[in-house]
Amino acid sequence: MTVQTLQQYFGFSGFRPGQSEVIDRILTGSSAAAIFPTGSGKSLCYQLPALQLPHLTLVISPLLALMKDQVEFLRSKNIPAACIDSTQNRDETLQIMQQARNSELKILLISVERLKNERFRQFISKVPISLLVVDEAHCISEWGHNFRPNYLKLPAYQQELNISQVLLLTATATPQVIEDMGNKFKIAANNFTITGFYRSNLTLNIVPCSERDKFNHLVQFFNGCEKEPTIVYVTQQKTAEYVAKKLTNAGIHAIAYHAGLNSELRSEIQQSFMQGQGTCIVATIAFGMGIDKADIRNIIHYDLPKSLENYSQEIGRAGRDGQPARCMTLGNRDNLNVLENFVYGDTPDKTSINYVIEQIYASEDKWEVMLNQLSRESNIRPLPLKTLLVYLELNGTIQSQFTYFSSYRFKLIDSMDQIIDRFEGERQNFVQALFNCSEKARTWYSIDFDALWKTYRAERQRVVAAIDYFHEKGWLELETKLSIDVYRIISKRVPLDKLVENLHELFYLKEKNEIARIHKMLDFFQGKECLSSSLAQYFGDDEAPQQCHHCSVCDGAVAQFPKIQQPPLDADIIKQWLQPYRTASVNGLSSKACSRFLCGISTPLSVKLKATKMEGFGKLENYPFAEVNKFVYELLST
């Protein structure tokens, strides 16, 4: 039956390695995980079972473009699928929600953030779900290369929504991350299917070169293959624009792609590349997720990738048709600081962690917080702030209750009397009370939840469900504002200073792990062992050949990146650079905060103080952060 479904819907005569095993586990009622290389058909592991499972398959997907591509593909195969995303208008979203309620969809794709929306949870809790699919599942692990705090909530959402089965999908998970994923979702090790990471058709070359010689090497690479589909990866947006322009001037048609372009233009560039109209994309890592183009012949890393996981994912986009493809890395240490600074900017100071804990300990049973505001006040970037709150949940200090909008307001389409007359008895009295407790300002009404509780004992959940229902029916237009996270305070038993110390240690360990990951990547590129074999071993694959005979090491060219010598740091000049920043800050600055300023690492405080306009901002961006911080710490201690 499964092979018949495969042929009927997808037109394939057989399965790729690992697919059948994963699908069988899902169809026999088990949870499972598929650890397959990029382009090896992970998506089929949920797409095919979804057709045979009785209820909805809910897919957590990390990127909007990825969701839309998946939906388009599924619909082309006559499989009823949809996604709910921020680009849709009200009518489109309501139509999809109604289809899900009516069991007209087999697959629904959403982002993990969608589950934080109380209105969405109200809706999805009433829809029977057979399978929860977590794409890019490595995001749940703090030891992975792309940790996302919201992913840590997925096991709890699985229980809350009463979903009996889960399928985890990823292309880049080390043995440590695989173990972590299994523990968090309670999936037995024998239900993980891991296929090999070795790609026999990929030639891996590491070319050591100085920054000034990079472009010449790039142009030489293109000699004779200007028309081949190629992706050139860079670290920063400005580099993408610069390289694309220089390539075009050199007669190689290239287009820059990065997150700074508007979504419509990015979509056009991607579609053009997919359809074979554009041959070379110069891109940041914003480009690639969901790119399922079989004939990409070349992947070039103009700058070092962020990690070996990123490198594996990015080169995995080449040669998916099985034909030979080339992967070249132009290597030096010049941009190493840029990669490290991404990490150092996400480690909060003790004073910042202390500020957050004080807010919690000053509350009684409940703590309500607007994350953007807390980020500004505590000087912790939004992502590490979310991580901090997750750590506090894991250690039993707080417990996430729900996220709600601080204000609901509506504009009438039908009259209040028309809406009230549609109900009878107690329901009619409740609707009457809801409108009585809504204050009008011109055409918009704001709901007073406190007044509703006092006068009618109407719980917030019921009010939200009702106003949502009116909105769906088209009786009124609904608008929500300011997301607020509500936590229950579980325990304040740990002394504040000890808790701050413990949490700071967690962030410090995470920082060390991330920096070590960057240096493991550096060691890989300069290693003396076969590159293909070393990469496979990093991901726990011992089946790859010891010598691939299609990498630069096997060809006898071991890469060495020369170390960069910078001029000695000058205490007087650094004091001069720091003076305006320290003066502008009311509460004083740690040595790390000063070092971030000098290394050009943006934080909520530096944005607030408009630090980028100060002379010293980024003056030491070419120096290792650890070296700058050691110097500044000693400077400020004297």
Image: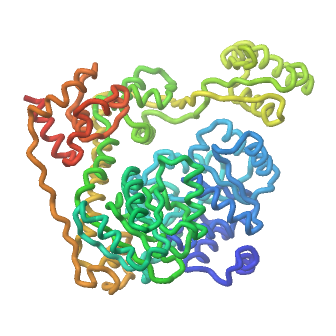
**Residue 403 visible from this viewpoint:** yes
User: Can you tell which quarter of the image residue 61 is in?
Assistant: bottom right
Q: Position of residue 166 (x, y in %)?
A: 60, 59
Q: Position of residue 147 (x, y in %)?
A: 43, 51
Residue 558 quadrant? bottom left
**Quarter occupied by residue 462:** top right
In the image, taking residue 610 as reference, residue 593 lies left or right, namely left
Q: Which part of the image, by quadrant, shows the N terminus?
A: bottom right
Q: Residue at x 48, y 75 (%)?
A: 228
Residue at 86%, 25% in the rendered image: 414
**Where's the C terminus, which quadrant?**
top left
Q: Nearer the viewer, residue 103 or 81?
A: 81
Residue, x 39% and y 37% (percent of image)?
A: 381
417 versus 310 height, above or below: above
Q: Position of residue 231 (x, y in %)?
A: 45, 66
Residue shown at 59%/57% (left/top)? 268
Number of numbered labels in the structure image: 0
Question: Residue 11 or 209: which is nearer the viewer?
Answer: 209
Front-most of 223 and 447? 223
- Decide if residue 503 is in sight here: no
